[in-house]
Image: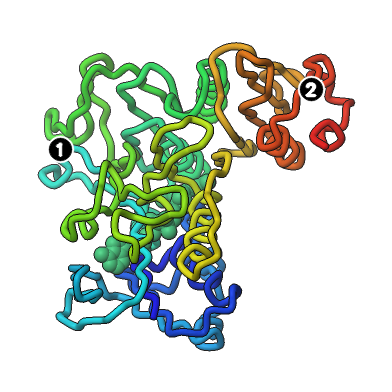
Amino acid sequence: MICIVGASLAGDTAAATLRAQGYTGRIVLIGDEAEPPYDRPPLSKEALEGDSADQRIFLRAQSWYSEQDIELRLGHAVSAIDRAARRLTLADGATLAYDKLLLATGARARMPGGADATSLPVFRVRTLADTVALRAALQPGARVAIIGAGVIGLEVAATATRRGCAVDVIDLAGRVMARVLPPALSAYMADLHRAHGVRLHLDAGSVAFASVDGQHGVATARHGFIGADVVVVGIGVVPNAGLAELAGLDCQDGVVVDEFCRTSDPDIFAAGDVARYPCPFEQRLVRSENWRHAQDHAVAAARNMVGQPQSYGAVPSMWSDQYDVKLQTCGWLRDSGEIVRGEAGSAKFMMLYRDDAGLVVGALGINQAKDMRFAQKLIEKRIAVDPALLADPKQDLRKLAQ
Ligand SMILES: Cc1cc2nc3c(=O)[nH]c(=O)nc-3n(C[C@H](O)[C@H](O)[C@H](O)COP(=O)(O)OP(=O)(O)OC[C@H]3O[C@@H](n4cnc5c(N)ncnc54)[C@H](O)[C@@H]3O)c2cc1C
């Protein structure tokens, strides 16, 4: 019997993979949210913009789970793992035995100090419930202060702008999406937001909830007081590793796993946002917080759980949709050695990044969905290509990646 804790992308993918690999034993997929597994990327995009996407975000038809004989236990948190007895305890006191266990507990949104004390409505965007609540608050004309100019903060800024809100984005960093983009691309995304009327308050010095003359908002050291009707927080996530820590598993800002997704207990595996895994390219433990990784890592975990060894070492990749820009990255974006394919700064171009040996190790695409697939292949296969050919958009990247 296999138990999976966390009924979201990684947990759901692992359950499906177990069945696809011919596992015929009992599978129980346990999630603390009330809804069946759903996709999170639309939560800051289509589903925040309008309620028509709400029904489309579910990963499967409800009937699929019974057809596959996968038991869904929704609205149940797992509160403890008894490793010696190989038994889970749920928050309501029920217990479940397991032979193998997968932790796919993901991450939760980090909240700043003072969020509980302010009389302003403060939102995060991690669950469908968060999105439904925020959507109701994003009324035309509402003043929305977003703390955090990362991927989620900027996606919310784009969506709120589309809904007719007046948007201020505040960050301690001096540039937007600083964790994922090189400086020139931060400037590109910042210009995009400014062109849509978003006010960016970067390098803010300090950020705190405040009230001035009866008005509520956010006080910054460098940009003063910013009045708001609604605050949205997008300052990163914290891995849901408490259950693993309590059970004495090796954890370091996430549950530590080996290349086969095994934790320090050979019967317990972890995958997705919660797992810290050895990256063969960086030769260190990393934690990835993106969709493709959660899916691929879960596939590898499931295979390893049923004795089909698969070492995991995917090239990381992510995407973000803001206004009419689809931004995608894969691999490692360095501060130098980049090759521009197309016209940098235009509505459609690609940057390719090389290591000291001249091999492509990273790529960034603006509205380049098709070519990004081949860029990823170039990185995975470690193919050396003449930079002049890479820079020429007339050269077929698919062929160069063969
Ligand atoms: C708003 C938003 C937009 C995003 N957009 C993009 C994007 O554009 N591109 C991209 O690449 N990635 C995006 N991501 C990231 C991507 O969605 C995540 O990487 C992915 O959801 C991770 O999947 P997961 O299954 O590992 O974890 P999660 O999706 O976090 O799921 C973990 C589940 O486990 C549950 N759980 C936790 N503890 C317990 C417990 N003790 N008992 C039972 N259940 C428990 C949680 O409640 C949750 O349901 C976005 C994420 C968010 C929040």
Q: Which of the 4 quarters of the picture holds residue 53?
A: bottom right
What amino acid is at disc 1?
Gly
Q: Which of the 4 quarters of the picture holds residue 338?
A: top right
**Residue 107 at x, y percent in the picture:** 33, 51
> Badge 2 is on which residue?
385
**x 40%, y 50%: residue:** 273
Q: Is residue 95 visible?
A: yes
Q: What crowding class fits label 2: few (fewer than 14 Cα within 10 Å), some (14-19), or many (20 or more)?
A: some
Q: Does residue 139 appear left or right of residue 82 in this picture?
A: right
Secondary structure type for disc 1 = loop
Q: Which of the 4 quarters of the picture holds residue 118?
A: top left
Q: Nearer the viewer, residue 200 or 244?
A: 244
Q: Are marks 1 and 2 in contact (CB under 8 Å)?
A: no
**x 51%, y 49%: residue:** 293
**Residue 137 at x, y percent in the picture:** 35, 52
Q: Does residue 238 appear left or right of residue 21 in this picture?
A: left
**Residue 126 at x, y percent in the picture:** 36, 53
**x 72%, y 41%: residue:** 373
**Up/down of 37 relative to 233, above or below:** below
Q: Does residue 266 appear left or right of residue 44 in this picture?
A: left
**Residue 133 at x, y percent in the picture:** 34, 59
Secondary structure type for disc 2 = loop
**How far apart, in angstroms, are the residues tagged by discs 1 and 2?**
49 Å
Ligand 1 is in which quadrant of the figure? bottom left
**x 33%, y 69%: residue:** 33
Q: Nearer the viewer, residue 287 or 219?
A: 287
Q: What crowding class fits label 1: few (fewer than 14 Cα within 10 Å), some (14-19), or many (20 or more)?
A: few
Q: Quadrant of the C terminus?
A: top right
Disc marking residue 113: 1
What amino acid is at disc 2?
Val
Q: Is residue 368 visible?
A: no
